[in-house]
Amino acid sequence: MRIVNVPLGHRSYAIKVGGGLLSRLGAECAPLKLGRRCAVITDSNVSKHFSKAALKSLSASGFQPVLITVPAGEKSKRIAMVEKCYDQLAAHRLERKSFIVALGGGVVGDLAGFVAATYLRGISFVQVPTTLLAQVDSSVGGKTGVNLRAGKNLVGAFYQPQLVLCDLDALKTLPKREYISGLAEIIKYGIICDAILFAQLERNLPKLLQRDTATLAAVIARCCEIKADVVGQDETENGLRAILNFGHTIGHAIENSSGYGKFLHGEAIAIGQVAAAKLSHEILGLSSHDVARIEKLFAQVGLPVKIKLSVAQREKLFAAMKLDKKVSDGEIKFVLAKKIGKVEFGCKVPVETIERVLNGG
Ligand SMILES: NC(=O)c1ccc[n+]([C@@H]2O[C@H](COP(=O)([O-])OP(=O)(O)OC[C@H]3O[C@@H](n4cnc5c(N)ncnc54)[C@H](O)[C@@H]3O)[C@@H](O)[C@H]2O)c1
Ligand SMILES: [Zn+2]
């Protein structure tokens, strides 16, 4: 098992990465000095595979868990579902010392984390992320929240868990498209912070695609370490944390303008990162060799690297990008790479340059 510490003073916590961790859930929670009552919040897909093991492990360590299952999918990340969870926590008489286990992907983590942050003004919570994206990204860093009709993640709280358990065995049941999508965030960590990780990904790609446990353990732990380090320096996104958004300005605009659901998040940010690499070549002098390596790795993983747009779609995409990010004097701020492993944030890019890059010119 690998352990990564998230350094946040008295709110510091450990991320544990390894196989078979779900069966140790109760034993891992025991030293946290939490109350006996707890709630496992999960979704309908994850529940089928893992809720029994989670409940069994908690009960074996003397906890009294209740299971709350929400429908799978982004639609569960909303206020109405938060209220349903509160009602069940109250019915099960969870009190200040009680805790919540978020068992699932980013949707469950964001929802259950927000419920934990607000129920009784905040009770403890433990993350057991079961998607690749959740293990390397959403379970680390303490952002929790739900969506409004007006947009994603508009209501939320920064709220750190007590512990994160990344059970690599959980990834075995993950649908292939979800798994591949998670790899887009992993590649991102290589580009923004770690050229050695990027080279390892290039070298070990077949093993990674086979979901080899030893390869995954090293890669996931490294990604968590990078995110923990960035979050440790800038918890509430005043500066450095922006680098985690490499590829996301265009990625979010693709998700927004194509209607949520067409592209998975990882697919949209793969296109966004390749475009950001091309912008980096023009603005920061990222070498053509590095741009080619980035595009090749995404393609080899099986992620899209470009998007074909009609004139109307392009207009929609730019409108989405301008809404998302502040535009001043016809320029949009980007995170761009100087070389693989080194990025800068707040780089102003003229709208025409973005248009040219997205048009493939
Ligand atoms: N808090 C953050 O910092 C942060 C960061 C990135 C993304 N997010 C949020 O995360 C969400 C996306 O997370 P996601 O990609 O994990 O999506 P998700 O939680 O919807 O999971 C994807 C699908 O996989 C299923 N699933 C999960 N684990 C499984 C497993 N082990 N086996 C089989 N099926 C499994 C789920 O039921 C779902 O259908 C978005 O809402 C996004 O806003 C949050
Ligand atoms: Zn992302």
Image (cartoon, rainbow, N blue to C red):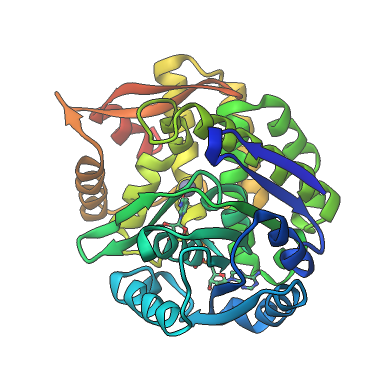
Is 302 drawn above or below residue 326 in the view shown?
A: below
Q: Is residue 294 visible?
A: no
Query: On the rendered structure, is 306 left or right of 31?
Result: left
Determine whether 91 is above or below 116 in the image. Answer: below
Q: Position of residue 330 (x, y in %)?
A: 17, 27
User: Quadrant of the image for the C terminus?
Assistant: top left
Residue beneath the point at 38% across and 26% down: 239
In the figure, residue 134 lies in which quadrant?
bottom right
User: Is 294 situated left or right of 84 in this image?
Assistant: right
Residue 303 on image: x %, y %: 57, 52
Snapshot quadrant of residue 191 = top right
Q: Nearer the viewer, residue 296 or 328?
A: 328
* In-image side of 271 versus 16 (left or right): left
Q: Position of residue 8 (x, y in %)?
A: 53, 34
Which residue corresponds to the image point at 54% horizontal and 74% vertical from the top-left? 39
- Observer-nearest of 179 and 239: 239
Q: Is residue 250 visible?
A: yes
Spot the residue most to the top.
285
For this orientation, the residue located farthest to the right is: 214
